[in-house]
């Protein structure tokens, strides 16, 4: 096995699907609910298969990543204005924020970089690709696996068929630019087409906090039923009334040990 494959395998533990918790929102949201006290939020995530964060915040995670059985560390490498939802940015300007080498020095097991296309400027799209491809090449030189984050610009998410087409095509593009896995949106009943068209693991993200915890569990169940290798959830874990219990229920659903209803009942997820 290559160094990339060995490190990526840490996400999946015994080879099953993975539950990743994202705690990198402060880079673009500021002190978001659930992450105002960052150290307290981080320490509750020991049961996650992996945790996604900004490299500069590793210093505030205590012993989260220490010891056998701890989560794998996924470090975000670039900064995308489209994630600054409170300020309404729309152009998806992407810049490097951390080099792969610096991420390795923090202890990263896996790296992540975002890519947004269809920004309404071919020049801008090409620049976003240049940034992503450069990071992918640097990661490969270090034997580090790279997760490509496929994110849309503008209001594409409101147009379901067009959005699905974007996700399906961009996932394949990101794969061919050097990604080893992909984090993207669950697009509904046709999501299996995204998985079938991309020969690397796909993770479905949770996006905004859903009104009911059972809805988040159903999103995860539907994604893995369509072939996703796991999920990347942030707000739905962090802003749960009892984050550790929701995380346990989410893992049970993603790993096929319980239906959403069974997990909700067992862990008291109202």
Image (tube, grey):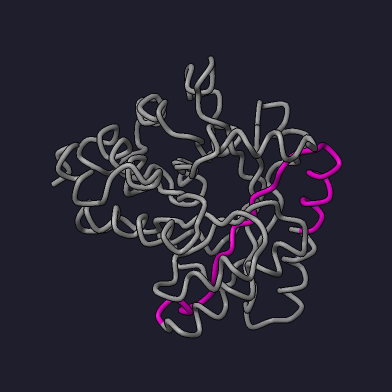
Q: Residue at x 55, y 38 (%)?
A: 15
Dividing the picture into quadrants, the one containing residue 6 is top right
The answer to whether residue 165 is left or right of residue 100 is left
Q: Does the magenta run of residues contain 107?
A: no
The one of 231 and 136 positioned closer to us in this rendering: 231
- Where residue 215 appears, as percent x and y from the top left, is 25, 58
| Residue drawn at x 76%, y 64% as measured from the top left | 176
Image quadrant where one finds the N terminus = top right
Q: Nearer the viewer, residue 210 or 143?
A: 143
Report the residue at 62% width, 77% height from top. Answer: 119
Q: Is residue 72 above or below residue 140?
A: above
Identify the residue at the far right of this view. 141
Magenta residues? 133-158
In this view, 6 is above or below 231: above
Q: Is residue 130 above or below residue 238?
A: below
Between 136 and 12, the one nearer to me in the picture: 12
Residue 136: in magenta span: yes
For this view, does 187 lie left or right of residue 243?
Answer: right
Count of residue discs: 0
Residue 261 position, x and y percent, is 19, 51
Residue 201 image offset from top left, x and y in percent: 60, 54
Q: Residue at x 49, y 79 (%)?
A: 163
Quarter of image, res 127: bottom right
């Amino acid at each position: 096995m290559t160094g990339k494959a060995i490190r990526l395998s840490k996400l999946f533990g015994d080879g099953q699907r993975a539950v990743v918790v994202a705690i990198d929102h402060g880079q673009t949201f500021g002190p978001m609910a659930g992450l105002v006290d960052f150290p307290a939020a981080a320490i509750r995530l020991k049961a996650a298969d992996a945790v996604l964060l900004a490299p500069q915040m590793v210093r505030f995670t205590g012993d989260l990543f220490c010891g056998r059985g701890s989560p794998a560390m996924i470090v975000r490498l670039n900064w995308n204005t489209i994630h600054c939802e409170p300020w309404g940015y729309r152009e998806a300007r992407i810049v490097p924020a951390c080099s792969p080498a610096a991420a390795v020095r923090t202890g990263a097991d896996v790296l992540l970089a975002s890519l947004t296309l269809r920004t309404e400027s071919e020049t801008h799209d090409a620049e976003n690709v240049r940034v992503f491809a450069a990071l992918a090449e640097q990661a490969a030189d270090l034997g580090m696996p790279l997760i490509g984050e496929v994110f849309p610009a503008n209001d594409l998410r409101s147009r379901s068929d067009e959005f699905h087409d974007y996700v399906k095509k961009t996932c394949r593009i990101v794969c061919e630019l050097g990604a080893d896995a992909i984090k993207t949106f669950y697009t509904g009943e046709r999501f299996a087409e995204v998985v079938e068209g991309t020969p690397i693991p796909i993770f479905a993200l949770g996006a905004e906090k859903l009104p009911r915890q059972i809805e988040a569990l159903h999103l995860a169940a539907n994604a893995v039923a369509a072939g996703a290798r796991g999920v990347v959830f942030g707000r739905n874990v962090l802003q749960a009334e009892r984050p550790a219990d929701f995380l346990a229920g989410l893992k049970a659903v993603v790993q096929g040990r319980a239906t959403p209803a069974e997990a909700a009942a067992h862990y008291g997820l109202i």
